[in-house]
Amino acid sequence: MTIFDSLNPARPAEIIGSFRTSTHIDIDEAVERATDAQKAWSAVPIPARAEMIAAIGDVLASRKAELARLVTVEAGKILTEAGGDVQEAIDMARFIAGQGRAAWGTTHPCELPSKFGFTTRHPVGIVGMITPWNFPVAIPSWKAFPALLAGNGIIIKPSEMAPACCDAFVSACVDAGIPDGLINVVHGFGEVGAYLAAHPKVRAISFTGSVATGRKVAIAAMEVGPKLLSLELGGKNAAIVMPDADLDLVIEGALFGGFGTAGQRCTSTSRIVAHRSIATELTARLAECTAALNIGDPLDARTNIGPVINAESAARILAMVERAAEEGNGIVVGGKIAHPEGCEGGSFFEPTIITGADRNSYITRNEVFGPVVAVLEVSSFDEAIDTVNDCDYGLSSAIYTKDVNLAMEALHRLDTGIVYVNAPTIGAEIHLPFGGNKHTGNGYREAGSRGLEQFSETKSVYIDYSGRLQKAQIDNREALS
Ligand code: UN1
């Protein structure tokens, strides 16, 4: 039996919880439990399923403060951001509950007389979810609520870095009255995820995390036979700053987008693509504001930047910044591991601004997942768009300008799943589709009206009420007219 501990990233001596790594037998049993429960659940009318999800939202809302505190101590997010994480789950419950009374398909005219076509949605059965630590309550909710509404049974394998948050989320589901065995958690590392992904009775896998792990999950899932597989992977998100932009707004947005969650969002702003005419002023002012940010205990309301998730992560970020320096890029501010008072042994990284990189630099092509922002200079709007798009990822982008024509042009040409105008690259709302292009994903979108797609199969239904055999795809148009 293998036990692992979840530690507070700000003070790793503080153990948040001890967890037992799930064995193959545990996972098989969870799948069996979910399979039994799912049969009855899929027969529950959809609006009644929706009411259960609304009830979960109410339980989450009643526990918001304690859940937020848990997110802070386990994932290291400052309290306001941790509250936002929990609020996303509450909002998602309310949104999905509403979807339970919305259209469940589309109707279509048919080619032949007295014939009618429509679509409906069918549960896939048992769905596996592999969720990250950086939105440890929100992301399980983005996946679990649409999956439940669609009539599925669920197995979640949360990140080994935030297992307690996932347990607390599932406890809220159970306390709200979700049927026994319908939603299950298995714990552990990559091997547990791989076994779940490859499980022949798990029909859909939804993964959020890195590209490298996403590839492994995809291979494990597909080896046993085709499955529904949705991948939500990395980002290398950029904000374009045109000469007419409101620089105060840009700076505020860059600090929030680049350093919020210590830069550990898949949507974090890691590139600022600034027009040469304002780049020097922008960099200087941004560096000054960056240097003034407070790094420290995320439970302290004065803290702007909490820890990164662990020492390994801090070392990786440091190595990436050092490589940028070796390539000749300038480290204008930050660039080092930090040791704030009262957080002995914690893993912190100074918010960092890098200059002198171009679109081919190491630091502008690779996801850092830490508080590191590179400022790139460009000479024109076209060059800015090309620079943003010249990247393997395509999750989120932004443009700061007061010129509506440029903003419209940009939002059409930016090759990302999310585009912001005069706002940072983070902060997606749960009722719009979330996801990205290129290496960021494999074509699905989470949340919004498309959130159900990864957890349900579309069924096309034809009803022929003519009372005779009508042959479609037979060239009989003339006979019909
Ligand atoms: C993530 O980092 O995986 O748009 C999700 C945002 C948040 C979600 C981020 N609502 O920044």
Image: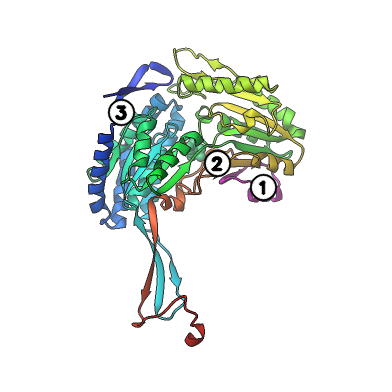
User: Which residue is identified by label 1?
Assistant: 410
Per the rendered image, the range of residues in magenta is 399-423
**Render colour scheme:** rainbow
Please say if 80 is above or below 33: above
Q: Check contact, mark 3 vs mark 1: CB within 8 A.
A: no
User: Which residue is identified by label 2?
Assistant: 439
Identity, as a three-letter code, of the amino acid under mark 3:
Thr
Residue 21 visible, this angle: yes
Q: How many marks?
A: 3
Q: Secondary structure at mark 3?
A: loop
Answer with mark 2 or mark 1, whichever residue precedes in sequence. 1
Inter-mark Cα distance, 3 to 1: 47 Å
Q: Secondary structure at mark 1?
A: helix
Q: In the image, is residue 359 part of the stretch drawn in magenta?
A: no
Q: Position of residue 224 (x, y in %)?
A: 37, 45
Identity, as a three-letter code, of the amino acid under mark 2:
His
Q: Secondary structure at mark 2?
A: loop
Label 3 crowd (10 A; few <14 / some 14-19 / many >=20): some
Label 2 crowd (10 A; few <14 / some 14-19 / many >=20): some
Residue 358 placement: quadrant: top right
Answer with mark 3 or mark 1, whichever residue precedes in sequence. 3
Residue 307 visible, this angle: no
Q: In the image, is residue 422 part of the stretch drawn in magenta?
A: yes
User: Which residue is identified by label 3?
Assistant: 21
